[in-house]
Amino acid sequence: MPVYIGKRLLVAIPTLIIISIFVFSLQKLLPGDPVLAMAGEERDPATLEFLREKYRLNDPVIMQYFYWLGGVVTGDFGISLRTNQPVLELIGDKLPVTIQLAVMAMIFALVIGIPMGILAAVWKNSWIDYLANLVALSGLSVPNFWLGIMLILLVSVNLGWLPASGYESIFVDPVRSIQTMIMPAFVLGTALAAQLMRHTRSSMLGILSADYIRTARAKGLSPWEVIMSHTFRNALLPIVTMIALLFGELLAGAVLTEQIFTIPGFGKLIVDAVFTRDYAVVQGVVLCTAVGFILMNLIADVLYVLLNPRLRATL
Amino acid sequence: MADAPVLSVQNLKTSFLVDGAWKSVVRDVSFDVMPGETVAIVGESGSGKSVTSLSIMRLLHADSSRIDGKVLLNGRDLLSLTEKEMRGVRGNEVSMIFQEPMTSLNPIFTIGRQISEVLTRHKGMSKQEARAETTRLLEKVRIPNGKARFDDYPHQFSGGMRQRVMIAMALASRPKLLIADEPTTALDVTIQGQILDLIKVLQEEEGMSVLFITHDMGVVAEIADRTIVMYRGEQVEAGATEDIFLRGRHPYTRALLSAVPKLGSMANRRWPTRFPIVDATTGEAVEPEEVADTVGKGKTPILSVKNLTTRFAVRSGLFARQTGSVHAVENLSFDLFQGETLSLVGESGCGKSTTGRSIMRLVEPTDGEIYLDGYNVLQLDQIGMRNMRKSVQMIFQDPFSSLNPRMTAGASIAEPFIKHKLGTTREAREKAADLLERVGLSASMMNRYPHEFSGGQRQRIAIARALSLDPKVIVADESVSALDVSVKAQVCNLLLDLQQSLNLAFLFISHDMAVVERMSHRVAVMYLGEIVEIGPRAAVFENPQHDYTKKLIAAVPVPDPARRGIRRGLADDELKSPVRPFGYEVPSRRYREVSAGHLVQVA
């Protein structure tokens, strides 16, 4: 097992290098001069030149890349041009917020999507199947922001059950924290739930027609045992991989959701950073996201191997 | 009450819901299975034999199937039970084993768990008790070192061993009736012999009845007390196995029996001989005439293989270092003459298919020389290889997946002709029409798609496609193995006819000894990538020298009811693996000449 994880980590290194080059050059290609943004109204050439020297923007691009990479490797993501805070600190502040949102959204997605998928597969072509498909299609086709606004109108404005926006750290006031997060998490989770449902359904259908399910039925096992232990355990394998990929989608969705519910998370951080050309922050956020995504996939791969005895043997 | 049947099926009728209408697939089937008796249901694909067994177990999809009639198990009608009561019958009073041992076990659970599940479910055993009983069962089905394999997963077992696990599972609750649905069809012939032996022994020990579903008349003759012949959903004949074989009354029964290739039927014949064709409606047999000699001996061989070796690297570890190789084909040499059929026989993993593919260069050989119709095959560049493939064509096993479903039969046959620029599109169509007639179809079928043809017809299309380049050599890789017996006989006859008229050379790759005996001029027996015995057909079959050849011939079930209850006493071993560690020194082999052209490996 350690060998396998080590191998996967080694494979991740070139990916990370490519991502870092991409991230670094992306901001060089963006229109707009960060120095102008920093200087504000001040257009004194001497000041601009001073700032350029200070941030080493006059050096060759390749050198700038290595300065930056050297910093990143030692945990120095630079200083936000906008707030003068270290980028790492900014990320450290915002990341837990988005992680909480993502985890809650994923819980929603799993709790809704997987049972719905199982039911739809077991009662294929029945009203349950059609209903599940209808719900899934709605989940996929209703835009996030619209659903969010409608929920705020209904649940917060009209019924007054949940706060419309804002954020409270889960470590300060857990109840309030979860209350503020329920709606955003639900909004973010619906599209994922729909995809998970479809994926679970087709995966279950594939397994249900397998020879060994016939064997399980011929043994006289109960439908519960046949479906949950013999079928679902097998159907889970591709779903685990899917969940890891969905986390990427989750981060993309979080950007929008955090805007609607004015949650001070990662998504808001990146949007603000892009608008103000806060390069260091953009780079830090994108790199963090990429590392997170690679980690999720690594975890999915490891889980896949652990769940699958045929692969376990090759470790 | 000793004479009461264990199972009594009365007027069984099973229908499937197809496009909103009920279509009956099994009609009016009635039979009894007495205590300790073995009854075989035999028939070709589509005869309804498997549906009958699934109907008895009520394992068909409840929404799209309807079962009428009576299925009495010790007097209790299974069809009137609730689904919950039925679950108490399945795996408990009636157990079932299936055709595909490779896919019939759940890959993510240990085999121990899968067997003990039956015991905890039906016998109310605790986990520890079930574990103890399971290890006993694993020993009982003669899995070597069975005790230690409780926690192993299905993928760690070979096909034959997995079937033993299935049998252990089926026997766990000591059922009164075992339904075996083609349990040996997917197995190699020596393994099939072992499994048949095992079923016979266990039946005696446990005193259970067996309902045996198969398409193989040889297996029927060996195992069944009574036989039921099914044809297109109906029971055409039932009786004692001996009566069915020797005094079958129904024309279909006689047609089926005469189409079965019988090992040993070629004694005293010099050349390959057509199968007798029996009219399924009248039962009249047409005796086959012996064909003329087609072999162009004395000339240069059309295909000459010298020291062919094909190995595949086995890699593992952190940097995928090569740790060993699969010695798929090892130092193989043979000649094939114009108009001759050379068969490569052997069991799975013996390298017979890899040999065919190496000759076509569909896989790259490691070493050796191949001369084909003047081409030095292993020295050819891309263009040369394309030209070379005009001389050698291949026919594959599965007629369902080897034709492109989006191309018409005519287009499939014409494509090689057009791609090799042998003529205009119009000429290609004429050629395709001509070839369709030649393989026994009609030119009007040109515009039909593969799904509109039966399996046998598709294989004829595949043959026509192979012929469209006027090849001199055809590599037929298990080309008749997937076909029903009667269709198999027809396709074999077609191949023999084509050899007569076109003077084709066949490299006939097959695991089926009886078909090989019928089809070949010469036979090469392969084992672990090497030829262990090669020679004229009569010499190899009538005077086998190598132990493996003898074992292979002895394992073939012969459709002769006099052999019922035969025990082969084969060792419960597995096929050996051709994987060798890196740096393995291949021993040099020596051959002894038994008679002219009959060579046997001695060391």
Image: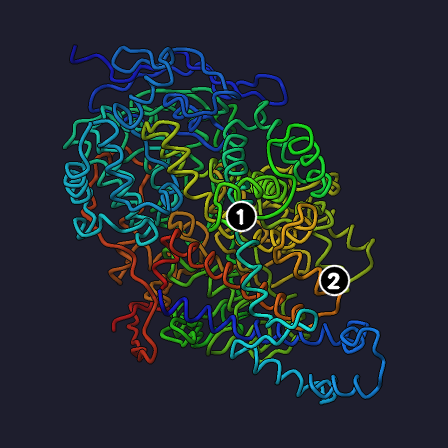
Q: Secondary structure at mark 2?
A: helix
Q: Is residue B165 above or below residue B203?
A: below
Q: Quadrant of residue B582?
A: bottom left
Q: Is residue B46 above or below residue B489?
A: above
Residue A71 horizontal side relative to residue B430, left or right = left
Residue displayed at 43% across by 74% down: B320
Residue A205 horizontal side relative to residue B443, left or right = left
Front in this rendered view, residue B19 or A55:
A55
Q: Is residue B551 above or below residue A140?
A: below
* Amino acid type, label 2: Lys
Q: Which mark is residue B168?
A: none
Query: Residue at label 1?
Result: B398
Within 10 Å of the Cα at label 1, are there few (<14), some (14-19), or many (20+) other Cα atoms?
A: some
Chain of the residue on which disc 2 is drawn: B
Q: Is residue B240 above or below residue A212?
A: above
Front in this rendered view, residue B244 or B466:
B466
Residue B124 horizontal side relative to residue B460, left or right = left
Q: Quadrant of residue A312?
A: bottom left
Tell me the CA gap for discs 1 and 2. Answer: 24 Å
Q: Is residue A54 visible?
A: yes
Residue B33 placed where, x, y %? 28, 19
Q: Secondary structure at mark 1?
A: loop
Residue B569 placed where, x, y %? 18, 47
Residue displayed at 80% across by 61% down: B423
Q: Is residue B571 visible?
A: no
Query: Residue at label 2?
Result: B419
Front in this rendered view, residue B416 or B242:
B416
